[in-house]
Amino acid sequence: MNWWTRILDFISPRQCVVCGCRLAPTERSLCSVCMLHLPRTVYQFMPDDNPMAQLFWGLAPIERAAALFDYEPHSEVAQLIYKLKYADRPDIGEDMGRLMGNEMQMAGFFDGIDLLIPVPLSRKRMRQRGYNQSERLAEGIRQITGIKVGSHVLKRRHFRKSQTSLNRQERQQNVADMFLLTRPESIRGRHLLLIDDICTTGATLMACVEALNNAENVKISVLTLGMTKK
């Protein structure tokens, strides 16, 4: 933190997005206490056989899958993701991306990954939000791992309606043929890591996997910030 940021922080103290406590100069969007106590899934230590990976079994071919946090409605993780998406806080995405990068890297989760693919937003959502939260997560991961971000490999065709209130079958129907692979030649023969903020039923991620598999000889893995706890 530079001197000008320290002055601004003194005038208008930064607060932890989870507990609201004042942040120390070396802390970013989360305080150290919240950083330590948010519920980890530890899926990265069993990346091909965990509750998230099992969502894809028999439905979409993936190499490995993990989420950093368990997600429950009205929880601290839910509050964190809500502010990332709706409170004009893209900085939370990069901070959490760096955290994901550090914690997943220790387990070797990024071994062999060639490119990070953030799940794209529709044009309408981009206009409303001003940024893609999945792209901010991917950027944070890039800062730790050095793996490039492929922001224009996938395109969302249109926005139907939010997945929030839909059941599993409705979610799958809502995202069917939703994503378009725009640059198949750029990912040929590469191992791709899909990045998103949350996995609930896996419907959106499966639709992305289906689109990416139109490229030749690709491998696909999946990483999200949170996964809905069953």
Image: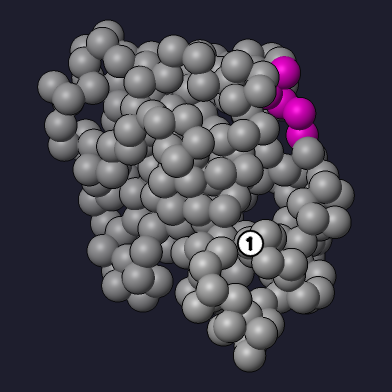
Q: Residues within 10 Å of mark 1 (few under 14, many from 20)?
A: some
Q: Amino acid at mark 1?
A: Arg
Q: Is residue 178 visible?
A: yes
* Left or right of 172, for residue 230: right
Q: Is residue 206 visible?
A: no
Q: Residue at x 60, y 25 (%)?
A: 105
Q: Residue at x 48, y 46 (%)?
A: 140
Magenta span contains residue 131: no
Task: Please say if 168 is above or below 115.
Answer: below
* Left or right of 81, for residue 161: left
The percent coordinates of residue 174 (x first, y second) are: 42, 50
Q: Nearer the viewer, residue 171 or 71?
A: 71
Residue labelled with disc 1: 28
Q: Find the magenta span and give its range.
A: 41-45
**Quarter placement of the N terminus:** bottom right
The percent coordinates of residue 85 (x first, y second) are: 52, 65
Q: Nearer the viewer, residue 132 or 19?
A: 19
Task: Please say if 173 is above or below 18.
Answer: above
- Please say which color scheme the image uses: one colour
